[in-house]
């Protein structure tokens, strides 16, 4: 009984700590270079001036595949207003699978492959997918989601950040 109570208390403490981290004040997005499917590169500094959703995902992740239509519709809804999306495939995802997924689903945003795992490491040792970051126009991470974000909450946050000067 005591062990169960201890485990439950530990789980609650970890959950509260995680929520605190996810909603804590903004931190500067780590300096990163993303290698896109076409071989070009994009850096964190290229994001400045736009609100950006950075989504760490994998083709083998059921939740990632399931949320992709919502990420597409969010991108299409806000892109003309100063919003970007960057999907970062995990290092264990075979590049041919990522290319096939991007082409067959006609992903309208940029897709990168983190072939060394260095980008996921620098963005907070991302191991779980999907993990999504919202970066404001100044290049600060203002929100981190582990798992699929609530679409209404996400859109509210994006609208708020787009309205900022």
Image (tube, helix red, strand yellow):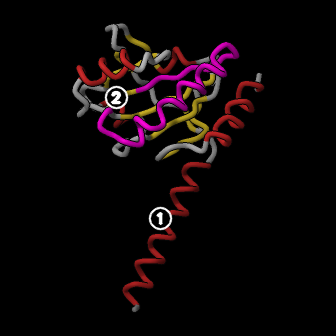
**Left or right of 119 on screen, residue 136:** right
Label disc, if present, on residue 139 of the rendered structure: none
Q: Based on the displayed image, in which of its 4 quarters is residue 104 positioned? A: top left
Near-viewer residue (24 or 134)? 134
Q: Based on the displayed image, in which of its 4 quarters is residue 88 positioned? A: top left
**Residue 156: image location, x then y, percent:** 72, 37
**Residue 63: image location, x then y, percent:** 41, 42
**Left or right of 18 on screen, residue 136:** right
| Crowd class of label 1 (few under 14; some 14 to 19; many from 20; radius 10 Å) | few
Write the start and end of the magenta stretch as one range: 59-87
Label disc, if present, on residue 14 of the rendered structure: 1
Whole-Å distance between the Cαs marked 2 and 1?
27 Å
Q: What residue is drawn where x is 59% and y is 31%?
A: 140
Can residue 124 be seen here? The reply is: no
Secondary structure mostly seen in the magenta stretch = helix
Residue with the mark numbered 2: 89
Q: What residue is drawn where x is 31% and y is 26%?
A: 114
Quadrant of the image containing the C terminus: top right
Say above or below: 16 vs 101.
Answer: below
The answer to whether residue 64 is magenta is: yes
**Left or right of 157 on screen, residue 110:** left
Q: Which tag, 2 or 1, sits closer to the chain's start? A: 1
Q: What residue is drawn where x is 30% and y is 30%?
A: 118
Can residue 39 be seen here? The reply is: yes
Q: What residue is drawn where x is 53% and y is 29%?
A: 71
Q: Are marks 2 and 1 in contact (CB under 8 Å)?
A: no
All told, the count of numbered labels is 2
Q: Secondary structure at mark 1?
A: helix
Q: Secondary structure at mark 2?
A: strand
**Residue 60: image location, x then y, percent:** 29, 37
**Residue 44: image location, x then y, percent:** 48, 21
Say above or below: 120 vs 72.
Answer: below
């Amino acid at each position: 009984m005591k062990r169960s109570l201890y485990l439950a208390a530990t789980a609650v403490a970890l959950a509260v700590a995680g929520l605190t981290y996810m909603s804590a004040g903004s931190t500067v997005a780590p300096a990163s270079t993303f290698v896109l499917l076409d071989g070009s590169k994009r850096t964190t500094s290229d994001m400045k001036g736009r609100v950006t959703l950075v989504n760490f995902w994998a083709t083998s992740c059921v939740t990632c595949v399931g949320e992709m239509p919502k990420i597409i519709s969010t991108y299409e809804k806000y892109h003309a207003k100063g919003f970007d999306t960057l999907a970062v495939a995990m290092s264990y995802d075979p590049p041919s699978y990522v290319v096939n997924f991007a082409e067959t689903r006609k992903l309208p945003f940029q897709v990168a492959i983190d072939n060394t795992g260095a980008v996921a490491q620098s963005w907070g040792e991302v191991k779980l997918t999907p993990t999504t970051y919202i970066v404001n126009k100044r290049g600060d991470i203002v929100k981190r989601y582990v798992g699929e974000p609530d679409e209404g909450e996400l859109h509210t946050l994006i609208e708020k950040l787009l309205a900022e000067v």
